[in-house]
Amino acid sequence: MASRSLMVVLLLAAVAATCARAQLHEKFYSESCPSVEDVVRREMVRALSLAPSLAGPLLRMHFHDCFVRGCDGSVLLDSANKTAEKDAQPNQTLRGFGFVERVKATVEKACPDTVSCADILALIARDAVWLLSRSKGPFWTVPLGRRDGSVSISNETDALPPPTSNFTVLTQLFAAVNLDAKDLVVLSAGHTIGTSHCFSFSDRLYNFTGMENPSDIDPTLEPQYMMRLKSKCASLNDNTTLMEMDPSSFKTFDTDYFKLVSKRRGLFHSNGALLTDPFTRTYVQRHATGAFKGEFFADFAASMIKMGNANPLTGSQGEIGKKCSVVNH
């Protein structure tokens, strides 16, 4: 009986998730706010023309939102006692919260109390990728209709894949939001844009086995690349220096990331982990050639849509936040 009850619970959960995803659709605001995508796009064009480096953090913010409680905008919420998701260590380096709030305010002027912060963040992420590919890369029509959550807990950011992850941990964390190994290798290419602080990978340079000395290095890192990283990140205690994740084109969304990973020049443990699995290694090597850009762009769009379907609040669930940083009162 217990096993049968468990099967019923799992079936109901799967049905509920399917129904929630079904309520997201591309024309959700076609009558209530038909201008929303144009409004978001104008703000994105303006922002990235002044600060193209903002695209990477905005894309990352959408990832971090969807991996914790689903794509519900909870990563945007403030907490008076600093216990919200944005206060947790993995989110300390996120940037762009003020920009998202400004976009929300602009959308509110056009369509009051209509468009959720979660949907705005999904549109921002799509436009960040498209604009940084010079309008030649991945583009997807974003399914919309998410509603905003009112709960944001810093401890729940354990669901985020850390840069120190091995392949087993990565696949487990991705599976928790219904993403498979292909989604993992495809979405990891988001690291083709943006920068990272040294502390996210300096253990590979000085403390790979816990010895904390200059010779305690990650042997999987390509030696010349390792020396370049050491010349920029002087010690384990460097908390301020930024490194480009894709040095040759960190302000352009392209396939160069796969070239770096194939040469053992991926910045993070998690990048190098893609070479330890036959399927993801083959995918990396195929796209490292640069000969299948269209294929990769289509894959990236499909995986972003799939990630954006992670446990959304829809229908009467959640709320339409008037601001993204605070819940409605």
Image: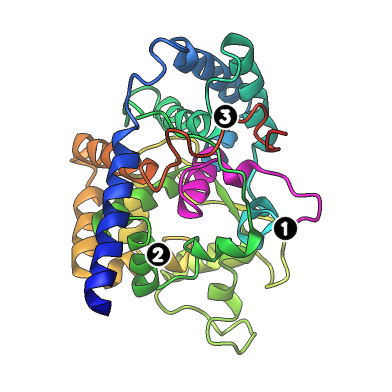
| 320 or 140, nearer to the observer | 320
Looking at the rendered structure, the number of numbered marks drawn on it comes to 3
109 vs 55: above or below: above
Q: How is the image coloured?
A: rainbow
Tell me the element at label 1: loop
Q: Residue at x 29, y 52 (%)?
A: 183
Residue 6 x/y as whole percent = 28, 71
How many C-alpha atoms fall within 10 Å of the one at disc 3: few (<14), some, or many (≥20)?
A: many
Q: In this rendering, is residue 313 above or below 263?
A: above
Q: Which mark is residue 149?
A: none
* Kind of residue sitting beneath label 3: Ile
- Which residue corresponds to mark 3? 320
Residue under pointer 2: 173
Position of residue 207 measured from the top left corner of the image (x, y, whole percent): 59, 81
**Quadrant of the rendered structure where residue 20 is?**
top left
Locate residue 33 relative to residue 28 in the image: left or right: right
Q: Residue furthest front?
A: 1
The alpha-carbon separation of the residues under discs 3 and 2 comes to: 28 Å
Q: Earlier in the sequence, mark 1 or mark 3?
A: 1
Which residue shows up at 18% across the image and 60% down it? 282
Q: Which mark is residue 83?
A: 1
The residue mark sitting in front, 1 or 2, is: 1
**Callout 2, which amino acid?**
Leu
For the N terminus, the image quarter is: bottom left
Q: Which residues are magenta?
A: 58-83
Looking at the image, residue 235 lies above or below residue 186 = below
Q: From the viewer's perspective, is the residue at label 3 or at label 2 nearer?
A: 3
Mark 2 Cα shell of 10 Å, populated few (<14), some (14-19), many (≥20): many
Is there a contact, CB below 8 Å, between mark 1 and mark 3? no
> Which mark sits nearer the N-terminus, 3 or 2?
2
